[in-house]
């Protein structure tokens, strides 16, 4: 396939691009700087609403992963604006550009997140669950809605609702390892909140399935089939590192340290399940947390 990817330098984009190239696909990148001569790069400027639509002609698929990192830096009003605009403006621009093409791609895979559901306690959430409340839920709602032009133009659209991703470098695990290795890791808040984690290798394989499976469209939960509570996540990680996990961060301390981000990312409870992936026959490489830790912690 001939594929163009935005956000190719992010955690998912790097792993996915490497795999797709290894599978002999032609991979091009959407980049926000002038592309050097001969490079497989397509220049765009989503914040300014600038893209050369003609450069997107004759692709088989578009994978849109670009967006401001939500876990870096405190959520000031300016940071929240960048988080929102980087997702909605870019997705609308790309979606409108694809809809205008004479030779449209067959499929648009566009990133989203389990933040769509908000904090829902013990409720089991598949793709049919309604959206929740909060800043990230609004971001995800509008992010997914921004693909509407492409869908209305007859392109198969899949919204990839990623859970927190475990990988050797980058993502959720990378930020947690240092305190846990020092023996000062522990649960956050009550520890009862669910974490719907997923291994990066399964993320890549799920995206590959979504590229080629005509039955997959609309929202797609990309999470492990076995979400765990924060306390269990903490214990399994401590065991994998052979470190104690007696420390804990009270909810008030998390809010003092991280502000609004604490409620939306650390104290939130999302028990999300990959119903559509399982119905499509997807087999997870790392369905259990301990197996994922063995893979990604060296």
Image (cartoon, rainbow, N blue to C red):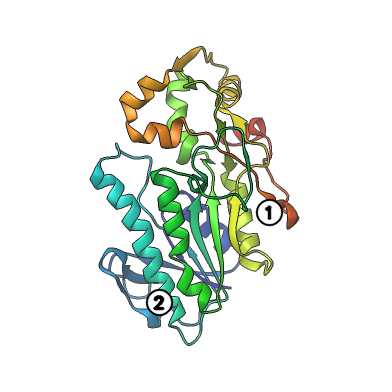
Query: Residue 213, position in %: x, y?
Result: 68, 66
Disc number for residue 46? none
Q: Nearer the viewer, residue 11 or 210?
A: 210
Q: Which residue is mark 2?
A: 97
In the shown orientation, is residue 124 left or right of residue 161?
A: right
Query: Residue 140, position in %: x, y?
Result: 45, 53
Whether residue 298 can be seen here: no
Whether residue 143 can be seen here: yes
Which residue lies at the image location 50% right of the left edge and 85% below the top edge? 103
Element on which disc 1 rests: helix
Q: Is residue 43 above or below residue 169?
A: below
For marks 2 and 1, the one nearer the N-term is: 2
Q: Is residue 177 above or below residue 280?
A: above
Q: Which residue lies most toward the bottom here?
A: 102
- Among the 4 quarters of the image, the one containing residue 56: bottom left
Q: Is residue 206 above or below residue 40?
A: above
Q: Quadrant of the N terminus?
A: bottom right
Q: Which residue is mark 1?
A: 277
Which residue lies at the image location 31% right of the left edge and 65% below the top edge? 46
How many angstroms separate mark 2 from mark 1 (CA)?
29 Å
- Among the 4 quarters of the image, the one containing residue 243: top right
In the shown orientation, is residue 179 left or right of residue 260?
A: right
Q: Nearer the viewer, residue 14 or 116?
A: 116
Query: Residue 196, position in %: x, y?
Result: 58, 39
Which residue lies at the image location 61% right of the left edge and 33% below the top edge? 122
Q: Quadrant of the C terminus?
A: top right
Element on which disc 2 rests: helix
Query: Residue 69, position in %: x, y?
Result: 37, 47
| Label 2 with label 1: CB-CB less than 8 Å | no
Which residue lies at the image location 48% right of the left edge and 34% below the top edge? 268
């Amino acid at each position: 396939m001939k594929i163009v990817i935005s956000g190719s330098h992010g955690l998912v984009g790097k792993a996915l691009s490497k795999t797709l190239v290894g599978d002999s696909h032609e991979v091009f990148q959407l980049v926000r700087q002038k592309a050097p001569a001969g490079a497989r790069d397509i220049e765009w400027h989503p914040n300014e609403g600038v893209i050369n639509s003609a450069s997107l002609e004759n692709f088989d698929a578009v994978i849109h992963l670009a967006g401001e990192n939500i876990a870096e830096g405190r959520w000031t009003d300016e940071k929240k604006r960048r988080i929102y605009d980087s997702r909605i403006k870019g997705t609308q621009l790309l979606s409108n550009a694809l809809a205008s093409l004479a030779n449209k791609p067959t499929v648009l895979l566009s990133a989203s997140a389990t933040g769509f559901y908000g904090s829902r306690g013990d409720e089991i959430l598949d793709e049919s669950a309604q959206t929740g409340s909060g800043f990230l839920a609004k971001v995800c709602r509008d992010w997914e809605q921004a693909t509407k032009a492409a869908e209305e133009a007859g392109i198969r659209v899949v919204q990839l609702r990623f859970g927190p991703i475990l990988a050797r470098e980058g993502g959720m695990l990378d930020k947690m390892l240092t305190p846990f290795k020092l023996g000062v890791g522990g649960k956050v808040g009550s520890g009862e909140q669910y974490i719907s984690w997923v291994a990066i290798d399964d993320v890549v394989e799920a995206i590959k399935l979504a590229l080629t499976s005509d039955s997959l469209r609309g929202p797609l939960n990309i999470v492990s089939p076995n979400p765990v509570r924060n306390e269990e996540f903490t214990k399994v990680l401590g065991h994998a590192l052979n470190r104690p996990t007696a420390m804990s961060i009270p909810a008030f301390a998390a809010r003092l340290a991280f502000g609004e981000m604490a409620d939306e990312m650390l104290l939130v409870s999302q028990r999300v399940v990959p119903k559509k992936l399982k119905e499509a026959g997807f087999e997870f490489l790392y369905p259990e947390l301990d197996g994922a830790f063995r893979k990604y912690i060296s």
